[in-house]
Amino acid sequence: MSMPAVSWTVTGVGTSPIYACDHFQAPFNVGIGCTITGTATYSVQFTFDDIMANDFVAATATWFTASDFSAVTATKAASFTIPCRGLRLNVSASTGSVKFQVQQAGER
């Protein structure tokens, strides 16, 4: 089953909703694109925590920064291949907005 594509925009400083990855896909491939309007500094983060668990709290989860998306200040697209449970955009400075687009490859 292929995962649905999503597109979220974060205006100002903050985090996007969490994209739920299918960590059972093999190979694990996710396309990520971030488009800046104005100026911004952002990172894409991932977690191995079970984001579907009843006691999951994003603020206390363990988040790792994707190496290709650490403190980025320009529009960027890349693939992500680390099997994980969730991805999110974290905008740390902004006078505009960042559009976060995610698409995971998988079987149809």
Image (cartoon, rainbow, N blue to C red):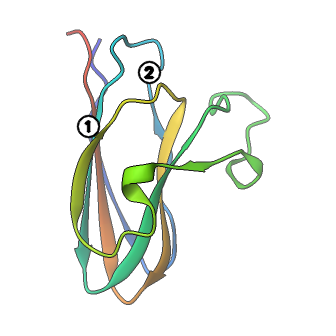
Q: Quadrant of residue 75?
A: bottom left
Query: What residue is disc 2 on?
Result: 22
Which residue occupies 48% across, 20% down? Answer: 23
Instruction: Please give the name of the residue rendered at 47% of the width and 25% of the height, measured from the top-left corner.
Output: 83
Q: Which mark is in front, 1 or 2?
A: 2
Task: Pick the quarter of the image with the C terminus.
Answer: top left
Image point (28%, 30%), residue name: 4
Which quarter of the rendering shows the N terminus? top left
Task: Specify which label sits upstream in the sequence, 1 or 2.
Answer: 1
The amino acid beneath tag 2 is: Asp
Q: Is residue 66 above or below residue 89?
A: above
Spot occupied by residue 79 in the image (x, y as percentages of width and height): 27, 39
96 left or right, relative to 54: left
x then y, percent, for residue 28 = 36, 21
Query: In the rendered view, does 50 fall on the left or right side of 81?
Result: right
Which amino acid type is marked by label 1?
Ala
Mark 1 highlights which residue?
Answer: 5
For mark 1, does the 10 Å Cα neighbourhood hold few (<14), some (14 to 19), or many (20 or more) residues?
few
Query: Which sits in the foreground, 75 or 5?
Result: 75
Vertical order, 78 against 69 (above or below): above
